[in-house]
Amino acid sequence: MFEALGLPDPCGEVYAALVAAPHATAAELAESCGIPRPTATVALTRLVRAGMAARTPGQPPHYLASAPDAAIGTLIGRREDELRTVRSAMFALMATYRETSQRTHPALAVEVVLGREEIGRRVAQLQAAARERIYGFDRPPYVEPPGTNEALAERQMRKGITYRVIYSREAVAWPGRLENDIRYSVALGELARVRPEVPMKLLVADRRQAVIPMAAPGQAVESAYVIHPSSLLDALIALFEAEWDRALPLDTLRGAEGADSTDSTDSTGTDTPRSPAPTSTPDDTTRRLLVLLAAGLTDEGISRALGWSFRTTQRRMQALMREFGATTRFQAGVAARERGWI
């Protein structure tokens, strides 16, 4: 029963009998399990050493079983730690193997990873192993809910690792993503930009390895490619740099104020929109609105991204159009660029 935890037969059988018969002796357990008394004694000694049983004083000695959740759970935790150590050693050896084998085995430049859990593990490992920089394209669908790796990214940024991320408009419009995840990451130092579309999901670490999660349209991510040093990795990095130059910065999210500052209430209790700041220096909320507008988000998408009501978003848009003297969203975007607002 417990061979996988390092306890050979009949330890599992003896432990199960002891759980059912507290304070049993070795002789009683041997009879219950149908095994010789010396064999039962050896099994009990192993169980005591493993913390799964305790021996009481007196002759003959009696035994008590430890609580199964604590006893077995501890052994499982130890084995999981051992397996994680072995897995890390395997990945390190594979990296060396690929580096020394690529000239004769070019196919080793691409590795296929299957399963959401394994993909999440490899992405986390890639971030944790970075020493200088992380680049990424971010767009739905997601292997794990957005923000799951926030603690790891925060630790890495505090260690001086540079994060550069380009978000698609769908990623920015994901409910709560902008205010609860992206804005927090930018405040920590993430360099974030937005594009109407990004060509794929991508994570690159130190220009040495990349992960591309793969999913069919409308389906969850179930597989990924891990790209090792190769011309393909060089091409992905070049693609990221080209998209970065075309993307709009989201650095206005750092310390930006909330939507509450955008509205006021008149004496009749009716909400009235405040106009954007004077033409020279727009406020943070206006900048955020303009960046999302230029990224191609609809009013509904902007509402979701900023946590505003649809009505508040429409009022803000109308105020911007009046400020710029524009009749279309495109004209408003051009005017904002001409003023240096975005």
Image (cartoon, rainbow, N blue to C red):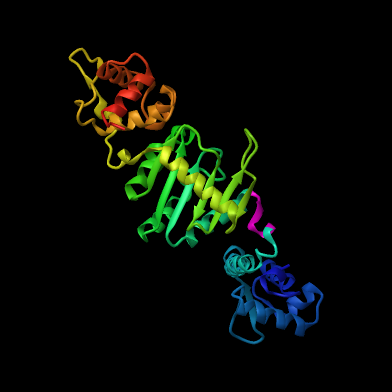
Is residue 179 part of the magenta span, yes or no? no
Q: Looking at the image, can residue 80 be seen?
A: no
Drawn side of residue 62 relative to residue 125, left or right = right
Eyeballing the image, is 246 above or below 286? below
Give the quadrant of residue 305. Answer: top left
Image coords of residue 38 (percent x, y): 76, 85
Eyeballing the image, is 63 above or below 187? below
Which of 199 and 169 lies nearest the eye of the viewer?
199
Give the quadrant of residue 85. Answer: bottom right
Image coords of residue 330 (percent x, y): 38, 21
Q: Residue at x 67, y 70 (%)?
A: 5
Is residue 109 part of the magenta span, yes or no? yes
Q: Residue at x 79, y 76 (%)?
A: 31
Which of 64 and 8 lies nearest the eye of the viewer?
8
Q: Which residues are magenta?
A: 107-115
Give the quadrant of residue 157. Answer: bottom left
- If the image is split into quadrants, where does the N terminus sit? bottom right
Count up the numbered dots. 0
- If the image is split into quadrants, where does the C terminus sit? top left
Drawn side of residue 150 relative to residue 47, left or right = left
